[in-house]
Amino acid sequence: MLDVHVRLAWPGFSLEVDEQLPARGVTALFGHSGSGKTTLLRCIAGLERAGQGRLSFNGEVWQDAETWVPTHRRPIGYVFQEASLFPHLSVLGNLRYGQKRSRRANPGARDTRFRLEQAVELLGIDHLLERRPAALSGGERQRVGMARALAVSPRLLLMDEPLAALDLARKQEVLPYLERLHDELEIPIIYVSHAPDEVARLADHLVVMDGGRVRRAGPLNAVLSMLDLPIRLGEDAGVVLDATVVERDERWHLLRLCCGDASLWVRDTGAALGDHVRVRILARDVSIARAHTEGSSILNSLPARVESIGDEDHPALALVRLDFGGGTLLARVTRRSAAQLELAPGDAVWIQIKAAALL
Ligand SMILES: Nc1ncnc2c1ncn2[C@@H]1O[C@H](COP(=O)(O)OP(=O)(O)OP(=O)(O)O)[C@@H](O)[C@H]1O
């Protein structure tokens, strides 16, 4: 577990965080620009020294009143928004340089050669090792930056918006590698982002920051399904559920997913039967009816119960939190529909899911 207590004050901005972050999976630090995500990450890395701070990782103290472990002695890998690679060194040279520095700082580190090979394989950069950074695309550079961070055998990986400087196509190219890191690495990752789609794909745990404070934190869906998030997600409001692929309809190119006690049909993405998958269901794609409707084009019609009703930014809209067999989800409906249906907490309803995306 990463136990973080930091207080830092600059003119016009202060950071006050007391949080325990899990020592496994991906924790996303999520918030608007200027909310303090990068500053918090830099405090964890030791790049920023909070005047009063206590920081420990799995019981090992990195900072308190008596202790200050400098960045190069913390067992971390850091991925920046843009990988700053040495232009005169090849990709391999860059990776080795990072390793050498880390070996000097942590002479007891485990077999680093193995780590380098593993990092190269994981990020798919084997064919780039002899190239100079100038001959890499933005996406390739970021993959090298990630491999460099991994090659030092970190016990904690810190990533500061690694996709932010990439265009959409490059982002799509790098995302699968991030997913691999999520699936195959045993070390925890702290991932700064302000992009809801990245958070939906990668995060297990979500920390929502605003004004230098943590406003909400918890398992991904527990936070995403809150009606009173300090950040309005608008079109991106929705949940992410875990599911298993249980049936393939070859004729109509559909997959049936088992999500808790509920079944969902989604487009066939090629996932295999038995695969564990993530499904993203946006609030705008869920509608509510009083009764089960026959003759609808919508495949997924399920019984649910209204849990609570909250506001949306636009006065015409409401956000409804519902329990269904598969967990908790959100529906965005007009206030007029909510009034006409006389929706109230505890009501039994039917939900129609217009689209659910496999992530
Ligand atoms: N060295 C500094 N001195 C003074 N103020 C700073 C310093 N570094 C950052 N800030 C301010 O602290 C606030 C938080 O910045 P930070 O970079 O942590 O935000 P962020 O949530 O990561 O934003 P972004 O998504 O844009 O990177 C901002 O208002 C920023 O201007």
Image (spheres, rainbow, N blue to C red):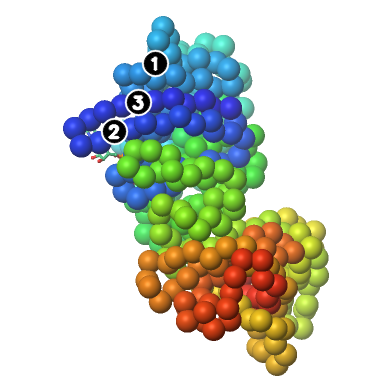
Query: Dot 1, crowdedness within 10 Å: few (<14), some or many (≥20)?
Result: few
Q: Is residue 230 above or below residue 355?
A: above
- Whether pointer 3 and pointer 2 mark residues with C-beta atoms closer than 8 Å, the reply is yes
Q: Is residue 66 above or below residue 77?
A: above
Name the one closer to the observer, 242 or 339.
339
Q: Earlier in the sequence, mark 1 or mark 3?
A: 3
| 280 on left or right of 55 | right
- Secondary structure beneath disc 3? strand
Residue that mark 3 sits on: 7
Which residue is pictured at 37% across the width and 71% down the height? 314
Quadrant for residue 257, please give it. bottom right
- Determine the CA span between mark 3 and mark 2: 7 Å
Is residue 152 shown to the viewer in this render? Answer: no
Q: Identify the amino acid type marked 1.
A: Pro
Which residue is pictured at 64% across the width and 60% down the height? 328
**x, y percentage for residue 278?**
64, 58
Which residue is pictured at 55% across the width and 15% down the height? 60
Name the one closer to the observer, 20 or 338.
338
Residue that mark 2 sits on: 14
**x, y percentage for residue 165?**
34, 51
| 58 on left or right of 36 | right
Residue that mark 1 sits on: 70
- Secondary structure beneath disc 1? loop
Is residue 243 shown to the viewer in this render? Answer: yes
